[in-house]
Image: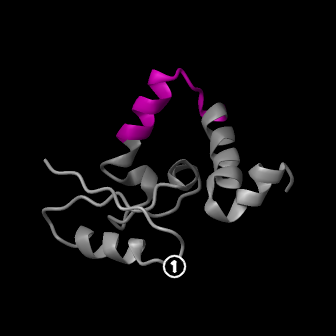
Amino acid sequence: MKLIYIVGFGQSGSTLLDMMLGSDPNVFSSGELVYLIYAYFNGEYCSCVQKVEGCSFWPKIIQEWKETNNLPDEEVQRFAVLDKKYSHPNSIKSWWYGYK
């Protein structure tokens, strides 16, 4: 198995490249992972066209993460909200300067 990790700044074309590579049936594309947990709890869609919670891949990963870290759903949901607030590049001012 070969792994290609695509990283890019906003509007750089990295998402488009990921989508093009992921359209090959022999390639697995994870898509943008920045909102994975948030998407899981809020009924958003995976690139496989299923909701993340109904996808054949991500629920197993999320469940293993929860079990490995002994996290109840309430804590994971709290993490999802905080992760969306502070991890996305658009919110860099929030964590850099410590304000909303």
Range of residues picked out in magenta: 60-74
- Residue wearing tag 1: 11
The residue under the point 71% across, 60% down is: 91
Q: Residue 92 appears at what percent x and percent y?
A: 71, 58
Please tell me whether residue 63 belongs to the stretch shown in magenta: yes
The residue under the point 41% across, 78% down is: 13
Q: Is residue 36 left or right of residue 50?
A: right
Q: Is residue 14 left or right of residue 26?
A: right
Where is the C terminus found, in terms of image quarters? bottom right
Q: How many marks?
A: 1
The residue under the point 53% across, 55% down is: 34
Q: Is residue 15 left or right of residue 21?
A: right
Please tell me whether residue 64 belongs to the stretch shown in magenta: yes
Mark 1 packing: few (<14 Cα in 10 Å), some, or many (20+)?
A: few
Q: Is residue 48 left or right of residue 25?
A: right
- Look at label 1 and name its amino acid: Gln
Q: Residue 29 appears at what percent x and percent y?
A: 29, 61
Image height of 47 relative to 57, above or below: below
The residue under the point 49% across, 29% down is: 66
Which SS type dominates the magenta stretch?
A: helix
Observer-nearest of 42 and 20: 20
Colouring used for the render: one colour
Image height of 15 relative to 29, above or below: below
Q: Residue 43 appears at what percent x and percent y?
A: 54, 58
Q: Residue 24 appears at what percent x and percent y?
A: 17, 70
- The secondary element bearing badge 1 is classed as loop
